[in-house]
Image (cartoon, grey):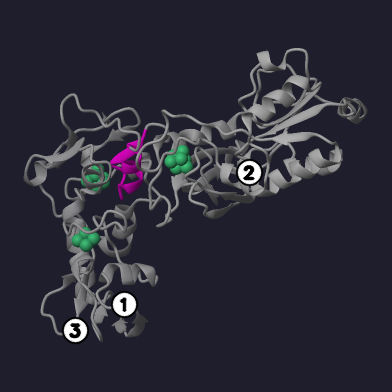
Amino acid sequence: MKIIVDNTPIECKEGELLINVLLNNGVEIPHFCYHQDLGADGNCRMCMVEIKGQKRPQVACDTFVCENLEVFTKTKSINEVKRSILELELLNHPVDCPICDQAGECKLQDYYMDFGLYNSHLTTPKTKKGKAIDLGSNVMLDQERCVLCTRCVRFTTNITKTNELGIIGRGDSSRVAVAPNRPLNNPYAMNVVELCPVGALTSKDFRFAQRVWFLDSVKSVCHGCSRGCNIHIDYNETKYSDEKVYRFRSRRNKQINQSFLCDYGRLSYRELNEKFNSTSWGMESFKELLRAEKKVALVSPSFSLQQLQAVKEFCKNYNIELFSLPYADESFGDDWLKTNDTSANFTGVKELNISTCQDKFNSFLESSELVVNFDHNLLKVKELENKKVISFTTSKIEIKCEAVFAIANFAHESGTIINCDGIRQDFYATKYRCEAPRLIELLEELQ
Ligand code: SF4
Ligand code: SF4
Ligand code: FES
């Protein structure tokens, strides 16, 4: 069926929520409290639209579409409504944008520039509320910046069901708070920072670390476990030439992680900034090592399909028995996103028919003179006594090796991985400089 939005026909399904139709068709519709993965609450009134035949403006997050519905989102009176709402929202706001981490991606700031632009009518002092309140392990709250949209509260009530956050007080004293001795410490707590449309909730990790307009972004997939949550890698390519990853943000994928990440995965970006040098290595001695008669290789189950394929070919050429073993951690998984398989592509390992048999690997390891380690982090020092080891690695390793080749980590790689449910996903390389070569190119050179 069709509805008409600002004189343009738009196709949609009967009964769809109007705000979703508008958002999915690129119609700009300001909103604080509505979120595609939290649903509607109807408290902010920012999504007001005019509907032909109705006297008063209606909220788009509580209107369901029907045939020939005619909607206006940009009329003078609607803009006036938004302006009044913004004036109310900002009445007691500290307007401390220059020191706020959300500046540059704050909805209050954006909407003020689009619809506000008024002079304050307030003649009495602003209501003061709590600043820099430590909510728990990873999140800080500034109550004065809050627009009381309740997204954070609904997240802990409806999604994690941990109920740490609530709104206390009345009128202009209303504020978000945690109950005494119940800090916001659940394993998904940092999602509230991303859900918050303004700078009221900030991440301790990202606070004052970087202005968002200096960040570039690339589409990627978290490698923290086999769920494969979709992320944006936000990194700095040029400013101050620091060339590092500053944060992971969730990228909406309705089928896998909706708009959420676990805190562990979100903070795993730190590993991508570890810098180390490889030992230099003459090609001759490398080839010499590969002449060993009995050789075994272990490859990381987090490598992409393309990397695994290159490793497979390399091992075939040098007659090396190739294995991959899972990263299993019974204490990591839960009944939502996190899985006990803490590798990113064990499904891909199996699809490429790489042997995953622990017993077989153990017996090959015992009889081998040379072990080639492709970034697998479970090899124990003891198992490798009296063996020669070559390592291709994305980070510092403890084991003693005859040769170490530093290789680029997944922030510098594009590739494909398959998650625990068999969903294939592509991820892409950032553009900042990496001193270590990409594995596939390095193996081609070494062949
Ligand atoms: S802290 Fe942020 S998410 Fe929570 S109610 Fe306030 S504005 Fe909304
Ligand atoms: S659930 Fe797994 S894939 Fe998702 S963010 Fe956490 S560690 Fe990363
Ligand atoms: S988004 Fe509709 S009332 Fe808040």
Q: Nearer the viewer, residue 218 or 72?
A: 218
Q: CA distance from mark 2 to mark 3?
A: 57 Å
Is residue 275 visible in this depiction of the protein? no
Which numbered marker is on residue 52?
A: 3
Residue density around tag 2, few if under 14, some if 14–19, many if 20 or more, within 10 Å? many
Q: Which residue is mark 2?
A: 349
- The span picked out in magenta is 189-203
Q: Residue furthest left?
A: 170
Amino acid identity at mark 3: Lys
User: Residue 243's spot in the image, x, y percent?
Assistant: 61, 38
User: Residue 304's spot in the image, x, y percent?
Assistant: 64, 46
Amino acid identity at mark 2: Val
Q: Which residue is mark 1?
A: 13
* Dots 2, 1 in contact, CB < 8 A: no
Amino acid identity at mark 1: Lys
* Dots 2, 3 in contact, CB < 8 A: no
Q: CA distance from mark 2 to mark 1?
A: 41 Å
- Disc 2, SS: helix
User: In what quadrant does ligand 2 lie?
Assistant: top left
Res 356 → quadrant:
top right
